[in-house]
Amino acid sequence: MTKKDFIPSSYIVHKTEGKVTYRSPSNIALVKYWGKKENQIPANPSISFTLDSCATTTTLSYRKLKVRGTDFSFDLLFEGKPKPDFKPKIKTFFERTEPYLPFLKDYHFTIETSNTFPHSSGIASSASGMSALALCLMELERELANDMDPSHFANKASFLARLGSGSASRSTEGPIMQWGQHKDTPESSDLFAIKYPYQVHEVFHNFQDTILLVDQGTKQVSSTLGHNLMHNHPYAEQRFDQAHKNLTNLQLVFKEGNLSEFIKIVESEALTLHAMMMTSMPYFILMKPNTLAIINKIWAFREASKTHVCFTLDAGANVHLLYPENEKEKIKQFIKNELVAYCENGQYICDQIGTGAKKL
Ligand code: DP6
């Protein structure tokens, strides 16, 4: 498929107004996307668990303009209040998606959005937010076109979400999403994410993710800036190569349910992501002392308890604890006894692998 396949030919239905709501979850990458080419094309393939409770709900109301606008016309409400600082990101999203959604300047949009997770919890809302908005726009396009093949709908929703934020391409569906061309997955694409197409052992069903909120402040360095620092990075090529290999190895791990190998890949990916940040020019550190304290506690507990809890990190200080459902009781106790003390205001979020966005 090429990006031309996402340019619609013509619309059949005339819609003057309406509204649509989607709830889209966040996701946590196992093999990380870090580094991109022009037009939101990833430098390496990535794979993630779609989450369940951490989600954004977005309602898109649309009203056809009497005369097509010369610019995009939209209002943005976050948790019921106008949010001017989110507008530039939405404008960029509209600019990037307009060639594929030629109706964008024909309507005035009101975008009302809210998150289930606390604002400024350090949890990135761009993945769930851009995915929810892309799905709402696809729903409008489906109405205008009168009908649409479900697989085209799914691929294009992920394609549009990607143009808003790369990781958002992996939030439209679930439970495991893969984005970026990879030799062992012929259906994979740089343009959109697909549902992981191979066998997954039952140990990964209902996999748990507890997010320890270590630092709820705003990040010093945005992901977009961090991605750019992978250009001319001394270890970039080796890193991209490693991501390809880790994806290949993960296929066998998923098939066989080999949790020890899963842990090695996932923790190495998390630490490599942060190693790339520390070796960029300029260099930066997003982990906090409590991030490291938690990692050490996890290692000691895993050794002593013979459980299969492991950690991953996104571009911040918070720690995601991943573990199989049948170890839930032991690990929740461990979190309460030993890890809560390292969380800001004792806060953490219990989530698990989910099936993807839903229309409400
Ligand atoms: C570390 O998707 O937030 O979470 O495409 O610039 O919006 P943009 O970046 P973004 O980067 C996410 C990076 C990551 C790893 C991952 O989710 O794969």
Image: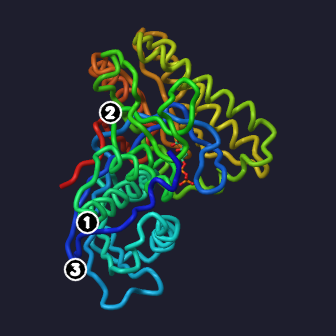
Kind of element beneath mark 1: strand
Q: Earlier in the sequence, mark 1 or mark 3?
A: 3
Pick whichever, 193 or 28, lies toward us: 193
Q: Which residue matches tag 3?
A: 16
Identified by mark 2, the residue type is Ile
Q: How many marks?
A: 3
Q: Which residue matches tag 2?
A: 353
**Is residue 145 found left or right of 210 in the rendered image?**
left
Q: Mark 3 or 2, which is nearer the eye?
A: 3
Identified by mark 3, the residue type is Thr
Kind of element beneath mark 3: loop
Identified by mark 1, the residue type is Thr
Q: Mark 1 or 2, which is nearer the eye?
A: 1
Q: Position of residue 347 (x, y in %)?
A: 36, 44
> Can you say whether 154 is above or below 327 in the image?
below
Quadrant in the picture for residue 333? top left
> Can you say whether 308 is above or below 352 in the image?
above
Tell me if residue 220 can be seen.
Answer: no
- The residue drawn where x is 18% and y is 55% is 360
Pick whichever, 57 or 132, lies toward us: 132
Q: Which residue matches tag 1?
A: 59
Q: Position of residue 316 (x, y in %)?
A: 54, 46
Tell me if mark 1 has few (under 14), some (14-19) or many (20+) residues whose alpha carbon lies within 10 angstroms of its own. many
